[in-house]
Amino acid sequence: MIGITGSPGTGKKTIARDLSENMNVDVFDINKFIIENNLAEYEEGQLIVNNLKDVRERIDNEFIGKEFIVIGHLLPEVIPKETLLKVIVLRCEPDILIDRYKERDYDELKIKDNLVSELIGTIHYNTVMKYGNDKTFEIDVSNKNVSNIVDEITMIINDERISKDRIDWIDYASKSNKLRRYLN
C-alpha cells in the first residue's frame, strides 16, 4: 500500500484519484471513512477525532486482503508503519494554499493554523517520525499539473527516482520577505 498525506489543499484526493486509475487500485480516504463511520465530531468547523485507537482498529479491518492508496492528513496517526511501502507528503507554496483556503471559505484561524503547519512541515515531520526517512518522500506540488505529479509518484513507487526533495517553506518565506505576513 502507498500513503499520500499533506496539508489540506495540497491535492491529495485529486492526485490519488488519477494515481489509482493508473495503478488500478482503489483509494481509501481516511477522513471520508471517519465521517461515514461517525468516528469524529465537528467543532467550530474542525473535524475532531475522539478515539484514534478505535479508528486504527476499524481501518485495520478494512485493509484485510486489500490494496489501497491511502490518503489523509491523519495518515501518520492511524496507519501502522508496516502497512505502507512508501508515503508521499504533498507540499505546496504558502501563497497558493492561502488562495485555496479562501476558496474553501476557511476562517482566518483555520487558514493560519494550516498555513503554519505547512510552513514548519508538521505533517512531513510526523510522517518521517512514524514511517522513517526511507519510506517518506516529499513532493512540491506548487504549480505542477496532476499528470506530472502522478508520474513523479509512480517513479518513487517503482524506485526510479534518484533524489529526494527537501522542502523548506520557512527559508522560502524568509528570502521572499513573506514570513511575517504568513505568521500575522
Image: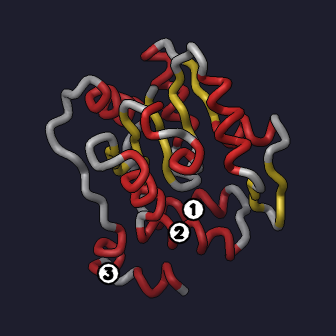
Q: Quadrant of the C terminus?
A: bottom right
Q: Quadrant of residue 108?
A: bottom right
Residue 48 drawn at (x, y percent): 76, 58
Q: Residue at x 51, y 48 (%)?
A: 76
Q: Residue at x 44, y 30 (%)?
A: 2
For marks 3 and 1, give the one nearer the viewer: 3
Residue 79 drawn at (x, y percent): 54, 40
Q: Quadrant of residue 93?
A: bottom left
Residue 138 drawn at (x, y percent): 34, 49
Three-letter residue code for mark 2: Leu
For marks 1 and 2, give the one nearer the viewer: 2
Q: Which residue is mark 1?
A: 99
- Residue 19's place in the image compared with 88, above or below, is above
The Cα–Cα distance between marks 3 and 1, rounded to whole angstroms, is 20 Å
Classify 10 Å Cα crowding around label 2: few (below 14), some (14-19), many (20 and above): many
Three-letter residue code for mark 1: Asp
Asked whether the residues under the numbered discs 1 and 2 touch, taking CB atoms below 8 Å apart as contact, a structural biologist would say no
Q: Earlier in the sequence, mark 3 or mark 1?
A: 1
Q: Which residue is mark 3?
A: 174
Front in this rendered view, residue 93 or 43: 43
Type of colouring:
secondary structure
Q: Which residue is mark 2?
A: 115
Front in this rendered view, residue 171 or 145: 171
Q: Residue at x 39, y 56 (%)?
A: 129
Three-letter residue code for mark 3: Ser
Classify 10 Å Cα crowding around label 3: few (below 14), some (14-19), many (20 and above): few
Asked whether the residues under the numbered discs 3 and 1 touch, taking CB atoms below 8 Å apart as contact, a structural biologist would say no
The Cα–Cα distance between marks 3 and 2, rounded to whole angstroms, is 15 Å
Left or right: where 110 falls relative to 42: left
Q: Quadrant of the N terminus?
A: top left
Q: Earlier in the sequence, mark 1 or mark 2?
A: 1
